[in-house]
Image (cartoon, helix red, strand yellow):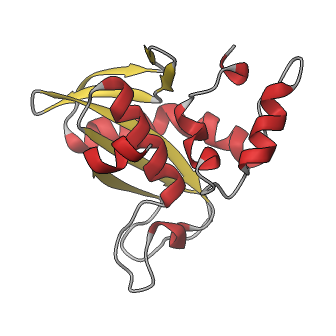
Amino acid sequence: DCQSILGIAREVAAILGKSPWNTPLTLFTAKKQENPTPASSPWMKAGHMYEDALLHRAAEHFGMTDLVHGRILEDGWKLASLDGDAILNGERVIVEAKTTTNPSHWFDGAGKEIVPDYYRLQVQYQMLVSGVGTTIFTVGNLDGKTFGDYGEWFSRIVHADLELQAYI
């Protein structure tokens, strides 16, 4: 059960105090429970429902092949649960499916495309564990409106940052 194990990629932001959903203390408290249960909300459930469609949308858009869903990778005590991974231009890439009701979180104050810190930390950890050098985010916009040129779907590409990975 991943919930009781330390070292899961999605928890890195909480451990480093960058998560909007958890603090280091709430994460520690959850891990100390006898039978920890994963956090869930209607938005998280919606995200899981859209995951398959988002992964396939990204594979089609970028021309990826050999898409594999839900791979769990281990490196010693480190654990990474990938939404998907695929081959792009002969290289393996991680594909992370996210949903948002607030696309502005994916832009800085000047309108430049970004990846929120909490997701950037997650995928840097996943790339560290897996040895993969690139992650493609496929993001479903659930706010019911189009967002500039981005409409209902947009993507972000993140490359391995060895300095940040060493910090993590």
The quarter of the displayed image where residue 132 is located = top left
Kindly give the residue lying farthest to the right in the view shown: 34
Residue 122 appears left or right of 61? right
Residue 106, x across and y down, in percent:
46, 66
Q: Nearer the viewer, residue 162 or 148?
A: 162
> Is residue 159 in view from this perspective?
no
Horizontal arrangement in the rendering, residue 7 relative to residue 34 (left or right): left
Q: Is residue 115 above or below residue 88?
A: below
Against 91, is 75 above or below?
Answer: above
Residue 32 rendering spot, x and y as whole percentages = 83, 26
Quarter of the picture holding the C terminus: top left
Residue 7: image x %, image y %? 56, 28
Q: In the image shown, does 126 or 53 lie closer to the viewer?
A: 126
Which is more toward the observer, 135 or 26?
Answer: 26
Q: Residue at 49% of width from left, 22% of height from top?
A: 78
The total of numbered circles placed on residues is 0
Left or right relative to 23: residue 148: left
- Measured along the vertical axis of the image, is residue 145 above or below residue 24? below
Residue 69 shows in this picture: yes
Query: The N terminus appears in which quarter of the rendering?
Result: top right
Q: Does 153 appear above or below 159?
A: below
| Residue 114, picture quadrant | bottom left
Residue that lies at the very extreme toward the front in this rendered image: 167
Residue appearing at x 49%, y 61% in the figure: 116
Q: Position of residue 26 (x, y in %)?
A: 80, 44
Residue 19 horizontal side relative to residue 107, left or right: right
Pick the residue in front: 130 or 136. Answer: 130
